Amino acid sequence: GAVVSQHPSRVICKSGTSVKIECRSLDFQATTMFWYRQFPKQSLMLMATSNEGSKATYEQGVEKDKFLINHASLTLSTLTVTSAHPEDSSFYICSARPGLDFSEQYFGPGTRLTVT
Amino acid sequence: GQNIDQPTEMTATEGAIVQINCTYQTSGFNGLFWYQQHAGEAPTFLSYNVLDGLEEKGRFSSFLSRSKGYSYLLLKELQMKDSASYLCAFLDSNYQLIWGAGTKLIIKP
């Protein structure tokens, strides 16, 4: 089956520093990748949608200068949380869609970010 | 506008059957998903319904009524490992997933 990996799985950083999270599709090419954030006991919140080679589309209320998304290849997307603050602490999940079938979306295992 | 609702929490007994309901409102609809999410993990795909009716996959079944904006996930022969959150989500007219808040299912022995 289609596998999506995320790295790191957990990260603790100090306030003011930047953190990069990688999302890779291991056995398929992802034309579209999605980044979600999930706070405890809440549902997934879509942050942005990225297509390979083009700028990400951010959801309303998500600061694009703070959450930098790069989808440099068909198998890799990165999310960089810049100048992290404790309120950025959350569970970040990426997902990838192989093609034009909108019913297909595969999730990565998630990254737990804690900002101290 | 768009919205999607599901119960916050349900409790059921091991070996029993439980039905988790999901209602939604949207002007554009391209199918409804059910995902299972264990604490601290990413969601895993359970089902996708785009046409009305019941789809069965082993112990899990999912039902959709587009005219009523209603879906349910039916879990049979409950096992302790089924304790998890169950998320419903629909694809809107822009093919964007709109997520429910999730239903936490607690299985008791």
Image (spheres, coloured by chain):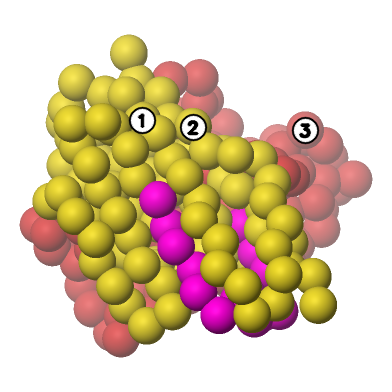
Chain colours: A red, B yellow
Q: Where is residue A62 shown, x and y percent of the image? A: 50, 26
Say whether marks 2 and 1 touch (CB < 8 Å): yes
The residue lying at 50 percent from left, 19 percent from top is A61
Subunit ID for the residue under disc 3: A
Give the residue type at disc 3. Answer: Glu
Q: Quadrant of residue B99?
A: top left
| Tag of residue B24 | 1
Q: Quarter of the image for the N terminus of chain B: give it.
A: top left
Instruction: State the SS at label 2.
Output: strand
| Residue nearest the viewer, comparing B5 with A53 | B5
In the image: residue B13, left or right of residue B65:
right
Subunit ID for the residue under disc 1: B
Q: Which residue does the numbered mark 3 point to in the structure image?
A: A87
- Other residues around mark 3 within 10 Å, as few (<14) / some (14–19) / many (≥20): few
- Residue range corresponding to the magenta coloring: B72-85
The residue lying at 79 percent from left, 70 percent from top is B108
How many numbered discs, if any? 3
Q: Is residue B77 magenta?
A: yes
In space, the residues marked 2 and 1 are separated at their CA atoms by 6 Å
Q: Quarter of the image for the C terminus of chain B: give it.
A: bottom right
Give the residue type at disc 1. Answer: Tyr
Q: Quadrant of residue B97?
A: top left
Q: Where is residue B75 shown, x and y percent of the image? A: 49, 68
Instruction: State the SS at label 1.
Output: strand
| Tag of residue B5 | 2
Give the residue type at disc 2. Answer: Asp
Q: Quadrant of residue B74?
A: bottom left
